[in-house]
Image: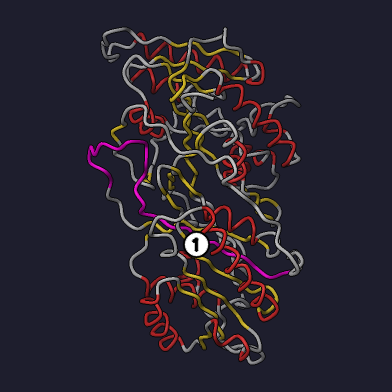
Amino acid sequence: MKNRFNNLTSKEWLPFQKSWFKYTDDYTLYRDNIRFFVKFDLKELPPTVFYYCSNPNNHQTIHAVAQKTKAVLYSESDLDKIDQLQFALFDLRDAFIDDISTASYMEFKNRMLALIYKIKPLLAHRRFIGIFMNQSFQQGAYYPFCWDLAKTIASTFSLKDEKIGCVDEESFTGQELPQFQTMNNMFYALYFRKDENSGSAESFSMFDYFTNNKSQPTNGKITSQFPSWFILKPPPRKKNEILHPAKYPEDLVDKYVGIFTNEGDNVFDPMSGTGSTQLQAIRMGRNGYGIELNEFFCNIANERCREQLTSVLQPKYTNQPEFRILNKDARMVTQGDFPEIDYIITSPPYWDMLNMKGAEYQARRKEKGLQLNYSEDDTDLGNIDDYQRFLDDLVPIYFSLIELLKPGKFMTIVVKNIKKKGKNYPLAWDLAERLQERVILLPESFWLQDDISIAPYGYFNTYVSNTFHHYCLSFQKPLST
């Protein structure tokens, strides 16, 4: 197969396809990106790269990479010298180290957008812009600058991908924090393409994630031992668990329930599946409550919990845990169904992706005669094919669940951004933006998968990564509304 996109071999190409990576140093970061997004033997287009670094100390590093790779570098002062670019690289990771206000961020954002305006006509067709950037936690409030800037740029460039740069695996060791706060040991690598689906260069559609942003209340302290990212390889699913097409692991529940709850607390999952949340809650001495639309899965969930409670291995707690999983639509949940809830953890359908034909995972399940989706119910969220309608149906469910949650308590949602038919849908970002109307957004963390084979999407033609990271979005209900 002829490599039309760059000069890399398959050995170099495929590792770059994974949607997260372990960061080692800036030289390697710049080199790998320039080598991937620049083709060095195009006679009609020289290996031209634009760069912008918010930290002046990185200029020497990127120039060393350019010298090694034979790339031709241009900066902001060289724009009038550029005929055409193959790649533009923005390193904004050091832009928000000090305390800043929303106003100062918007000033910086508008400056970056103006620079991207100037670059767009210089960038070759179907070539990429890469942006490295951090989120920001300032004065008790969390600001998802990366999501805001990405959605704004995506109104005039095609948002093609995101990668999570993982800096280290260290975690807090019992340090007392005034709020749940993950370590700042990750950054985003966002990739945009100038192509036939790009919008007009005349204006960006402006997004504002901060209209409803609130400072976090200080209602006691949480001992956090949590990194921004973690690799989790669940054990093989048991016979009754594999019947569910998208079960999330009890090990994941364990991490968050251990942070956000105490023994005897009430844990709730509105989309229970085969009962992962309730089962792990019981094991940890919490009460497990939930809703499940599909009667078949609801029965499995209840049976698993019953077996856990009667197991000889069941620990003896001060108060024996209880559970209740109802077979009903999460839209219909009422305050009378359950006691007041201390913590919600759940994973919604990843839109209608289980109904996508031809997926390798679905083909394997079909061969084994296993169920391919959650249900055939037309009201099932996983069967809604329109993205905006899916969001419009999902968000009110969470708003109603927040009413069950005690003031000051927490909710975690495990979700992915979605790639569908060549387009990216930032489900995690959109969900976080909408939910800030009722709850306080906390720093996100990532569950990373490292036990899945990489598929060669776009191989030798364009960049399409394998999405091996899940967002774990956490929110806090205000003490008062």
Q: Which residues are magenta?
A: 171-195
Quarter residue 103 falls in: bottom right
Q: Secondary structure at mark 1?
A: strand
Decide whether the magenta segment is chiefly helix, strand or loop: loop
Name which residue lies at 52% across and 66% down.
Answer: 131
416 inside magenta stretch: no
Name which residue lies at 40% across and 37% down.
Answer: 234
Amino acid found under the numbered disc labelled 1:
Ala
For mark 1, what is the residue? 189
Drawn side of residue 259 relative to residue 51, left or right:
left
Drawn side of residue 194 relative to residue 191, left or right:
right
Against 210, residue 22 (above or below) is: below
Against 398, residue 20 (above or below) is: below
181 inside magenta stretch: yes
Name which residue lies at 70% across and 59% down.
Answer: 155
Quarter of the picture containing the N terminus is bottom right
Q: What kind of colouring is applied to the model shown?
A: secondary structure
Q: Position of residue 119 (x, y in %)?
A: 64, 77
Drawn side of residue 355 relative to residue 296, left or right:
right
Q: Residues within 10 Å of mark 1 (few under 14, many from 20)?
A: many
Quarter of the picture containing the C terminus is top right
Q: Position of residue 464 (x, y in %)?
A: 59, 61
Against 372, residue 35 (above or below) is: below
Q: Position of residue 298 (x, y in %)?
A: 56, 17
Name which residue lies at 55% across and 34% down.
Answer: 246
Number of marks: 1
Q: Position of residue 164 (x, y in %)?
A: 46, 56
